[in-house]
Amino acid sequence: MGKIIAICLSEKKGTEKMVVEKGVLIENFGLENDAHAGNWHRQISLLEVEKINDFNIRGGNVDFGAFGENLIVQGIDLKNLAVGSQLKIGNDSVIEITQKGKQCHHHCQIYHRVGDCIMPREGVFGKVLVGGIIAPKDNIEILHSNITLEACVESFSEAKIAMKNGANRIELCENLSVGGTTPSYGTIKKSRELPVPCFVMIRPRGGNFSYSEDEIEIMNSDIIMCKELGVLGIVLGVLNNENEIDYPLLKNLIELAKPMSITFHKAIDEVSNPLMDIPKLIELGVDRILTSGKQNKAFEGKDLLNQMIKKADNKIKILVCGGVTKENLIEIQSLIPNNEYHGKKIV
């Protein structure tokens, strides 16, 4: 359960929003008297107060509404809400999440002043399903939380098709025949136009997950590129020559990648006991682990996958993969109850 901290409106696009005492949500329109309301999919925007506070601690010095956000909320983990999830506000109002993050075509005044803006990566957008009057301190609860269906694709056109078919997150790669490598600059940039999050593979080549100094330099450059393009998350995995997680290198890559979301990919299935690594990955700030339970198929790895989900204890996401398709998803869900699934043919 969360709550509204502040409500912000602006009468003109391109201006900062101002805090108001209450708001009127109008079905399939947005907030009354707000310039960004209308019959489209981004009728209302939300931002966590914690994100604004963190930004100010880093020298942002911004007031509520500075990022163009309508609702500042507390106690709701917007980052991990899938597109299609529904939030109830107060007694009656309901909004549906339609987009996470946004592409920033022109850097705003905040970015030019402090070199960063959190709205493109932390902002969440929605449409109003049920209207009503809302005010600060109103409760917000998750009425319906969509399961995340992450489609693994190797082109922008495939990403568009997957999204149209129901994927609410994309893993963007090239060369899936070798397990996926980092896509091109142009593909990554274009993916920011999509309303669903696109997580980018950071992998300089196929093969094993132990990298040379030159390859690590390439990974560092690709991570920096993704940050500059406003990518919401990256997917990576690094091991040493003994097939153990290379924690010193991983720590450096995570520090470089902040504040992007981090998925540790199927390199985890190469280690001897993934259960032992879950607490360490949590401590480093990894957000999710992509795994098929050390087997080729999720069906075969179901016992370990269920153990990993239990061990994760909602402190880190387990992203189930391994032959997950739209045809067998229901059966896999029954065997491996979870909130996130991944596959090339998942939709």
Image (cartoon, helix red, strand yellow):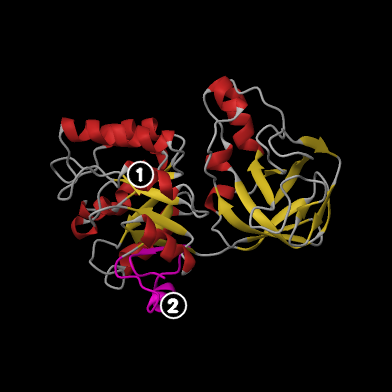
Residue 154 position (above or below residue 237): below
Q: Position of residue 246 (x, y in %)?
A: 24, 38
Earlier in the chain: of badge 1 and badge 2, it is: 1
Residue 114: name its quadrant: top right
Q: Looking at the image, which residue is at 19% across and 35% down? A: 215
User: Mark on residue 172?
Assistant: none
SS for tag 1?
helix
Where is 27 relative to 247, above or below?
below
Taking the spot 25% from the left edge, 44% from the top edge, the residue there is 203
Number of numbered callouts drawn: 2
Q: Along the line of sight, which residue is nearer the eye, 277 or 147?
A: 147
- The residue under label 1 is 186
Residues drawn in magenta: 322-347
- Quarter occupied by residue 81: bottom right
Q: Which residue is mark 2?
A: 330
Residue 136 placement, left or right of 165: right
Alpha-carbon neighbours of circle 2 within 10 Å: few (<14), some, or many (≥20)?
few
Q: At numbered mark 2, what does the secondary structure look like: helix, strand or loop?
A: helix
Q: In the rendered image, is residue 262 in sight?
A: no
Front-most of 279 and 108?
Answer: 108
Tell me the amino acid under the disc marked 1. Answer: Gly
What x and y, as percent, mark residue 227?
42, 35
Residue 34 spot, x, y in % from top left: 78, 45
Residue 343 lies within the magenta run = yes
**Residue 182 visible in the shown view:** yes
**Horizontal and vertical percent for residue 137?**
80, 45
Task: Give the CA distance from mark 1 to mark 2.
Answer: 36 Å
Q: Which amino acid type is shown beneath numbered disc 2?
A: Ile
- Disc nearest the viewer among 1 and 2: 1
Corner quadrant of residue 17: top right
